[in-house]
Image (spheres, grey):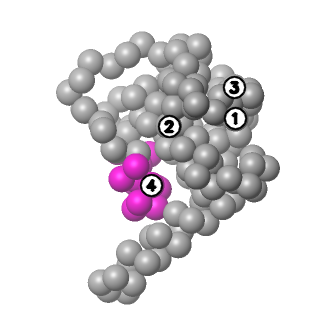
Amino acid sequence: MTGLEILNRNVQITHEWIDELDAMLGWNDKGRTYRLLRVTLQTLRDCLPLAEIADFAAQMPTLLRGVFYEHWRPNAQKHRYDTDRFYASIDHAFAQDPLEDTGDLVGRVFGFLLSKISTGEIGDVRHALPEPLRELWPQ
């Protein structure tokens, strides 16, 4: 594929990911599903070391990889995340339409990512996370 065909295919793959996650969530609201995926990926990114960020992002569709890196400042000081801070970051993006159970929804997003990203890479991501956040990934 060349030119716009590559872009069209990447848009299609991104829609497939969002459609599949939306169905898993039972929301029938692709905009809200996209927002949950985006903020969860970006919060996860902010918890990972630099090398792991790049390896993880490499397995995403191009458009979602861009979303993953959006607003990223690699030289910014890392926050120390625990479960409450991780969830608070997600909840902040949903201040106007609060989530019912952030922990469950984050677990579902992580479960979805288990089906899209290689097992080895997910293992690397889990291992690179601070101890309290490793428990957020379903086994």
The residue that label 3 is drawn on is 103
Q: Residues at badges 2 and 3 in contact (C-beta under 8 Å)?
A: no
Q: Residues at badges 1 and 3 in contact (C-beta under 8 Å)?
A: yes
Q: Residue furthest left?
A: 75
* Residue 41: x %, y % from top left: 49, 40
* Residue type marked 4: Leu
Q: Nearer the viewer, residue 68 or 124?
A: 68
* CA–CA distance in space, label 4 to label 1: 19 Å
Residue count near mark 4 (Cα–Cα under 10 Å), binned few <14, some 14–19, many ≥20:
many
Q: Which of the two labelled residues, at mark 4 and mark 1, occupies the earlier sequence position?
A: 4
Please tell me whether residue 77 is drawn above or below residue 105 in the rendered image.
above
* Residue 66: x %, y % from top left: 36, 53
The quadrant of the rendering that contains the N terminus is bottom left
The residue that label 1 is drawn on is 105
The residue that label 4 is drawn on is 64
* Residue type marked 1: Leu
* CA–CA distance in space, label 2 to label 4: 11 Å
**Residue 56: within the magenta?**
yes
* Residue type marked 2: Val
Helix, strand or loop status at disc 1: helix
Q: Which of the two labelled residues, at mark 3 and mark 4, occupies the earlier sequence position?
A: 4
The residue that label 2 is drawn on is 39
Position of 120 with respect to 73 (left or right) is right
* Residue type marked 3: Gly
* Residue 27: x %, y % from top left: 75, 49
Residue count near mark 2 (Cα–Cα under 10 Å), binned few <14, some 14–19, many ≥20:
many
Residue count near mark 1 (Cα–Cα under 10 Å), binned few <14, some 14–19, many ≥20:
some
Position of 111 with respect to 12 (left or right) is right
| Residue in the picture at 40% in, 49% down | 67
Q: Residues at badges 4 and 1 in contact (C-beta under 8 Å)?
A: no
Asked if residue 120 can be seen in this view, the reply is no
